[in-house]
Image (cartoon, rainbow, N blue to C red):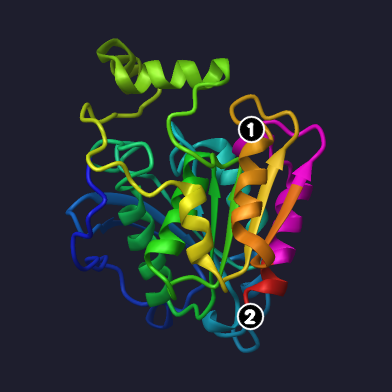
Amino acid sequence: MSNRPSGHVARSTVRPNHETAGRVPIRTFLRTSDGIAVDSVYDPGSAVYEASPDTAPAPSAAPVFVIAHGFTGDVDRPHVRRAAGVLARHGAVVTFSFRGHGASGGRSTVGDKEVLDLAAAVEWARGLGHARVVTVGFSMGGSVVLRHAALRPGTVDAVVAVSAPARWYYRGTAPMRRLHWLVTRPAGRLVGRYGLRTRIHHRHWDPVPLSPVEAVPAIAPVPLLIVHGDRDGYFPLDHPRMLAEAAGEHGELWVEPGMGHAENAAGDALLGRIGEWALRRAG
């Protein structure tokens, strides 16, 4: 698995938002720079378009949230759709399935080349007419939004990482030991394919990609929000604290009492607060 850049992100076949009036959801396959088809959905957002056609603001007036789901998620999972629905009250939303997940092509590299999937979704969001883009990632998706913002400066206006790891190869909790078995063993990959609808690449990382905590300093001055539950069963609190320390003054840390891990544990109230934070900080 390599993190070397693969060139330009290919465009989707749908027309730009200003040509389609921006009032209806769009579903299409985006093509990443390394040729993977990524199942993607655009929702213009109820907060923006609930007004009449004559008074509704242009798409560029509202931010677009690009949601990066966790490992074994996909664009149609109920917890992903719920998160998208809450954030749609604050702006438009793009959701997509990472490679190897759901209807997207390819195989999962567990956070490495997934940066290319997010890059395709962010570029599509810009092409739909939105001047402000906020990436919101959960768990594996949290590590991807951090690395994407560092590796592709100037492409996003704010970053939110929820339940993200700080470092690779962590095996300090039982869920993470199970995840490593799923990823590294042939039997585990079969379980992933047939039990979790997730096709996992059999190759090890080569080279090892930039870790989330190494990526965080390069995100500045883009606003960064790190959200983590104090009952996260996958990554203990030293992970968000490492990320926050690496972020320095440009980062903000929310430790949520009683919260577990990722999308399933992020309640509507928390997602609403994330949307409000983004509206304030994304410019």
Q: In which quarter of the view is residue 53 placed?
A: bottom right
Query: Which of 197 and 176 lies nearest the eye of the viewer?
Result: 176
User: Which residue does the numbered mark 2 point to in the structure image?
Assistant: 283
Q: What residue lies at 41% left-to-right and 59% top-to-bottom?
A: 148
Q: Residues within 10 Å of mark 1 (few under 14, many from 20)?
A: many
* For residue 3, above or below residue 110: below
Helix, strand or loop at mark 2: loop
Residue 47, image quadrant: bottom right
Indicate which disc, 2 or 1, sits on the residue closer to the N terminus: 1
Q: Position of residue 235 (x, y in %)?
A: 60, 31
Task: Evaluate if marks 2 and 1 touch, with contact meaning CB atoms under 8 Å apart.
Answer: no
Residue 241: name its quadrant.
Answer: top right
The span from disc 2 to disc 1 (Cα, nearest Å) is: 29 Å
Q: Quadrant of the C terminus?
A: bottom right
Left or right of 120? Residue 172 is right
Residue 219 at x, y percent in the picture? 51, 65
State whether residue 113 appears in this view.
yes
Residue 167: say if magenta.
no
Please give the name of the residue rendered at 56% of the width and 15% of the height, measured from the top-left corner.
174
Q: Is residue 68 visible?
A: no
Report how many numbered discs are placed on residues in the image: 2
Q: Which residues are magenta?
A: 255-277
Image: 5 above or below 242: below
Dominant SS in magenta: helix
Q: Of the residues shown, which amino acid type is indicated by label 1?
A: His
Q: State the residue position of label 1.
A: 261
Which residue is at a point 45% across and 34% down the rendered structure image?
Answer: 71
Q: Position of residue 65 (x, y in %)?
A: 55, 63
Helix, strand or loop status at disc 1? loop
Mark 2 surroundings within 10 Å by alpha-carbon count, few (fewer than 14), some (14 through 19), many (20 or more): few
